[in-house]
């Protein structure tokens, strides 16, 4: 493994993350070479002396592959392979390989293949030994088509095919979103740096069994579940792919339809590892990706997860507007999850108010619906069999209910039978 700092020494935390990426890809590290440069070397990215050190280290440890924690140009990758006699993979290629291993759904596999081909298309420069072979024959006199041109054409054709399939799948996903929007069910998307505990939190909130592992990019395919929250009713929770420093642009482009779950959400739950010493940098890196996919303006609730590992207390902090600004919880132990659910409900419905409604017998279906939505906080039955319900709902929902015959605010409710008799 080769770590390179450009304009600064190598950050030990970046090195630790790179080791985790390498382990997630299934490799076993046998050596580490660190280098610092003011600017990348055009030939090897690192200097010629450091390149020789990499070659010697690979030979000493009998390494099979050289991983570089930077984005290499095709020529730099090729020159290092020629010098070391081993396959060289840069950061983008390593992340693409992890994604290829983890993709499970049909759409996820198409997205990964598209990203890999987009990455490979830039590497088809003298990568073959038979580039001088030409297709010729009667009616095809002249230079013909080299193998390189054939490969480029076939890759371009496959990319267009994949893009067309993903567009079709994207339309199907948009149809599902459109149906959810018609039902007016709020959507909450979990986003965050990879391995921050998004899937664990998703399972804790929904009772689902999404795959969870202590590794980078454990899950790729988006998972959507419905969950009931007090005062709001049903909310759609969407678990999305984790982000990472310098996420390859090919992946962002390929997974744009999947990440659209975040862009179209009513609220983003930004899951943060509370014990990460570089959590502020991770927060900014996630927000940078969100801006890239057009989700920078979606309301966000930071959730500091894994508080059980840093001895923090579960709590929710509210801003000057009265809306939740931060939540501290542990998905693993369940500490603070009830407060987090209340915070999500407040954030999803910022105009939520508590009112007391008088519901007459002819509107009994309204009472049943309010209980199903977990909107009732208290109930008192009147002498004539009607009900006074203390509910917590959005102002617009209150207005809709008041338009139903037999539903009134308590201040405007008709006198009870006992009061009328008196």
Image: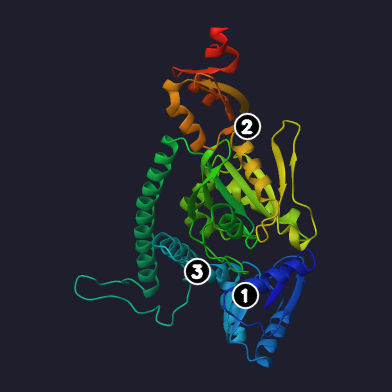
Residue depicted at x 69% and y 76%: 2
* Residues at discs 2 and 1 in contact (Cβ within 8 Å): no
Task: State the image coordinates of residue 374 (x, y, percent, origin top left).
Answer: 54, 38
Q: Write down the residue under mark 1.
A: 22
Q: Which mark is residue 350?
A: 2
**Mark in the foreground, 3 or 2:** 2
From what the image shows, is residue 333 above or below residue 384? below
Q: Nearer the viewer, residue 270 or 17?
A: 270
Q: Which of pointers 3 and 1 lies earlier in the amino acid sequence?
A: 1
Report helix, strand or loop for mark 1. helix
Q: Is residue 123 visible?
A: no
Left or right relative to 1: residue 149:
left
Q: What is the crowding at mark 2: few (fewer than 14 residues within 10 Å), some, or many (at least 20)?
A: some
- Relative to the observer, which residue lies in front, 355 or 352? 355
Determine which of the numbered discs, if any, sits on residue 102 in the image.
3
61 vs 383: above or below: below
Q: Does 363 sit above or below residue 371?
A: above
**What's the residue at 70%, 54% (across, down)?**
335
Residue in the image at 67% along x and 78% along y: 1
């Amino acid at each position: 493994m080769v770590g390179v700092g450009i304009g600064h020494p190598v950050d030990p935390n970046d090195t630790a993350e790179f080791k985790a990426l390498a382990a997630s890809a299934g490799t076993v590290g046998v050596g580490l070479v660190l280098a610092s440069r003011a600017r990348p070397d055009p030939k090897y990215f690192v200097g010629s002396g450091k390149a020789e050190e990499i070659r010697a280290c690979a030979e000493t440890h009998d390494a099979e592959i050289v991983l570089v924690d930077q984005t290499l140009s095709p020529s730099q990758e090729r020159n290092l392979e020629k010098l070391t006699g081993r396959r060289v993979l840069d950061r983008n290629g390593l992340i693409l390989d992890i994604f290829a291993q983890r993709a499970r759904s049909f759409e996820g596999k198409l997205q990964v293949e598209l990203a890999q081909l987009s990455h490979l298309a830039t590497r088809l420069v003298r990568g073959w030994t038979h580039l001088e072979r030409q297709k010729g024959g009667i009616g095809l006199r002249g230079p013909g088509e080299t193998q390189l041109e054939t490969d480029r054409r076939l890759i371009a054709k496959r990319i267009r095919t994949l893009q067309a399939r993903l567009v079709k799948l994207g339309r199907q996903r948009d149809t599902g979103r459109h149906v959810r929007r018609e039902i007016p069910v709020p959507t909450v998307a979990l986003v965050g740096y990879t391995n921050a505990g998004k899937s664990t939190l998703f399972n804790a909130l929904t009772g689902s069994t999404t795959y969870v592992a202590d590794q980078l990019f454990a899950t790729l395919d988006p998972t959507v579940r419905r969950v009931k929250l007090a005062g709001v009713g049903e909310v759609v929770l969407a678990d999305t792919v984790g982000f990472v420093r310098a996420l390859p642009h090919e992946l962002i482009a390929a997974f744009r339809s999947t990440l659209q779950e975040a862009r179209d959400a009513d609220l983003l739950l930004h899951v943060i590892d509370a014990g990460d010493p570089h959590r502020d940098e991770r927060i900014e890196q996630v927000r940078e990706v969100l801006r890239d996919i057009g989700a920078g303006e979606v309301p966000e609730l930071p959730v500091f997860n894994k508080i059980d590992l840093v001895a923090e207390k579960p709590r929710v902090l509210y801003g000057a507007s009265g809306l939740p600004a931060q939540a501290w919880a542990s998905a693993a132990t369940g500490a603070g999850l009830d407060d987090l659910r209340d915070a999500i409900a407040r954030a999803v419905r910022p105009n939520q108010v508590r009112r007391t409604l008088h519901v007459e017998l002819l509107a009994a279906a309204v009472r049943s619906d309010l209980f199903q939505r977990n909107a009732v906080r208290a109930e008192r039955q009147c002498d004539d069999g009607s009900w006074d319900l203390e509910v917590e709902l959005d102002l617009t929902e209150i207005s809709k209910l008041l338009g139903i015959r037999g539903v009134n605010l308590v201040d405007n409710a008709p006198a009870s039978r006992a009061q009328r008799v008196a």
